[in-house]
Amino acid sequence: ESKEALRVMISGAPASGKGTQCHLIANKYGLVHVAAGDLLRAEIATGSQNGMRAKEYMEKGQLVPDEIVVMMVKERLLKPDSRQNGWLLDGYPRSLSQATALKKLEFEPDIFILLEVSEDILVERVVGRRLDPVTGKIYHLKYSPPETEEIAARLTQRFDDTEEKVKLRLNTHHQNVEAVLSMYKDITIKINGNVSKEEVFTQIDSALSSLLGQRKAASGSV
Ligand code: AP5
């Protein structure tokens, strides 16, 4: 395992901008983006038993059972690219039991990023979100509209991106977030996620580069 590799967790309510920021972070820092929700949607797409079971929970805005999620995330983190380049864990852990499972497997983050966004903004972000199935890029009809007519015509919407479903997802988030935060409070940085995606990234970028700077200084002094 590379000593230099950064290990980052990012957390926040549904549609707080985790996926958007992860694309920017992964691009600049070369980390492997591991998104629990994306792993689950890929499993659903295969039509497997686990995928079908996961979808039942996701449609209700509830957490998918640990026996499905923990194994998927663990397998992804154990792949050579994550070990070598470092990882950026998005949407995991979402409960105390997931955090504990990760700790037992000795996956410890260097930093825990918490995106704070007010509730009315979250709902607006959810209902306007669209995805490009070809590139995987995340759009928003108002805040990040597609660049061309061709892209606009192929955009899709997630099955859980309705106002009704996001309320359920928010409830689940509120029930679990405190327990997770308490485990990482010593390494947590809170980011104002209400501003533009560029302004959010500026805050994250400065936290990550100062972390890397501290490390360099520490390794140079021994
Ligand atoms: P998951 O896919 O992780 O969904 P989520 O947590 O609800 O988060 P989202 O993907 O909705 O939002 P995001 O924060 O990535 O925001 P984005 O960048 O897209 O999980 C889905 C389900 O899977 C869960 O409900 C659960 O059932 C299950 N699951 C997942 N992980 C699990 C786990 N660990 N255990 C058990 N079950 C699990 O941005 C949103 C929109 O806003 C976009 O349109 C974007 O363009 C726009 N936007 C982003 N930033 C800005 C900005 N700064 N200004 C304006 N617009 C912005």
Image: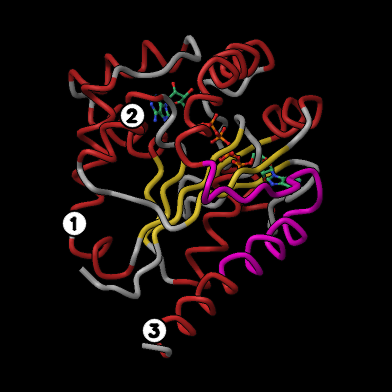
Q: Earlier in the sequence, mark 1 or mark 3?
A: 1
> Quick one: 173 or 196, which is closer to the camera?
173
| Residue stretch rendered in magenta on the structure | 185-208
In the rendered view, would you say 175 is above or below 221?
above
The residue carrying pointer 3 sits among few (fewer than 14), some (14 to 19) or many (20 or more) residues within 10 Å by Cα, namely few
Q: CA distance from mark 2 to mark 3?
A: 32 Å
* 2 and 3 marks in contact (CB < 8 Å): no
At 69% from the left and 52% from the top, the residue drawn is 146
Kind of element beneath mark 2: helix
Q: Quadrant of residue 183?
A: top left
Q: Earlier in the sequence, mark 2 or mark 1?
A: 1
Kind of element beneath mark 1: loop
In the rendered view, would you say 80 is above or below 118?
below
Q: CA distance from mark 2 to mark 1?
A: 19 Å
**Which residue was labeled with disc 3?**
219
At 39% from the left and 84% from the top, the residue drawn is 219
Amino acid type indicated by mark 1: Lys
- What type of secondary structure mainly makes up the magenta span? helix
> Quick one: 183 or 171, which is closer to the camera?
183
**Which residue was labeled with disc 1?**
79
Farthest-out residue, front = 222
Q: CA distance from mark 1 to mark 3?
A: 26 Å
At 53% from the left and 54% from the top, the residue drawn is 22
In this rendering, which labeled residue sits more in front, label 2 or label 1?
Answer: 2
* 2 and 1 marks in contact (CB < 8 Å): no
Amino acid type indicated by mark 2: Gln
Q: Earlier in the sequence, mark 2 or mark 3?
A: 2
Position of residue 20 in the picture relative to residue 75 (left or right): right
Amino acid type indicated by mark 3: Ser
Quadrant containing ligand 1:
top right
Q: Tell me: is circle 3 under 8 Å from ligand 1.
A: no
The quarter of the picture where the N terminus appears is: bottom left
